[in-house]
Image (cartoon, rainbow, N blue to C red):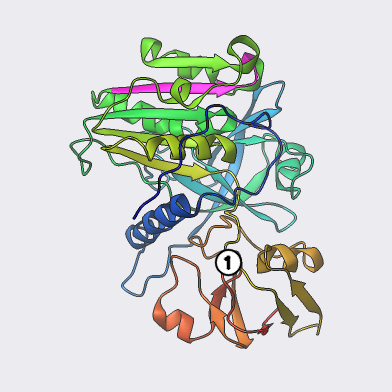
Amino acid sequence: MTVRRPAPAQLPADLYGKQRRDRAIRVFDAVAKTRLRWTALINRRDPHGRVDDRRLAMTVVERRVEAHDTDVISLLLTATDGRELPAWRPGAHLDLELPSGRLRQYSLCGDPADRSGYRIAVRRIPEGGGGSLEVHEALRTGAAVTVRGPRNAFPFVLPGYGSDAARLHFVAGGIGITPILPMMRMADRLGVEWSMVYTGRSRDTIPFLDEVEAFGGRVTVRTDDAHGLPVAADLLGDIGPDTSVYCCGPVPMTDVIAAAVSEMPGVELHSERFSAPPVLDGKPFRIELARTGEVIEVPADRSALEQVLTVRPDAAYSCRQGFCRTCRVRVLEGTVEHRDTVLTEDERAAGDMLICVSRCGGERLVLDL
């Protein structure tokens, strides 16, 4: 028997700020993981399942402030050698190699029809892992940067082009507009029926507002200072069956929408999260770093990646959700409980592990780090 929980009546007060662990969304996470497995398959570039990690040398040719109160900037990148860039589809992202060696993931928010440049947007997060601060401080106009990709973990499927839905509804919260904006453009260009709700604390905090409002009556912009915190009905409007909902924003917002959509027969939900999913059914274990002998304790509610970063802050990672392969390491001893969505059975048998989501099947792992 399936027990459905009623949708929360109102979003929590920390909607756009504090990140909290959302432990009550097992079903939603299971659906998301299923979709990510499918995404991993369509992003493969050879029969062995390896993702294309091509590296492109690029130059920052334009830098713009897109939202003052939340300190969002956009960067326009072009190929250093002037070549036409690889094609991409709405929902795609780049892995940006920063001067410090950090690797960070940012959604493409330009026009897929324009192969001359890639546009990304980055919100400064002072309390984050340092990537956004480095982008804001180091990547000025003229700066050289290397990117990997593009690749897509948030695929956009249009009605009549692979989706059974008759219409689309987009929801974006703040910087969550970045993957949604290209989807809106493509839907509008192809004449698909769609609507959109864009929300944030105030008009000064939400980026690309002029581009969003240029779509006219299809778009509803609501801000907390003018309208109060939205409830699920404010975000979803009067959508009915045969609708695909594409949502990107803070975890509390996506949780509320997921709960509401679960009560709407015939409505599909496609969502991208701002943060790593919570660890479910975890057990504590130890990690030994073979190259230094350091021993790290991993609590039941923390990922191996989180704990590795406490002693190796320069360790590579990107998606934190088990699909991009950036944090892949070789396991020298121990049994792995694989929770990723992309490694092949041969890769797992060879000892590969994605430490952002996978865990130890026993008490101890020795990693080639």
Read off the magenta span: 194-203
Quarter holding residue 292 = bottom right
Magenta region includes residue 233? no
Along the line of sight, which residue is nearer the eye, 19 or 45? 19
Q: Quadrant of residue 321?
A: bottom right
Q: Residue at x 42, y 16 (%)?
A: 219
Q: Secondary structure at mark 1?
A: loop
Residue at image mark 1 = 281
Relative image position of residue 39 (x, y in whole percent): 37, 56
Task: Assign the magenta stretch its main secondary structure.
Answer: strand
Q: Is residue 7 above or below residue 345?
A: above
For the residue pair 270 and 326, the one nearer the viewer reads as: 270
Q: If the image is split into quadrants, where does the N terminus sit?
A: bottom left
Residue 293, percent across and down?
A: 81, 85
Q: What residue sits 60% from the left and 61% below the top?
A: 279
x, y (%) of residue 53?
Answer: 48, 62
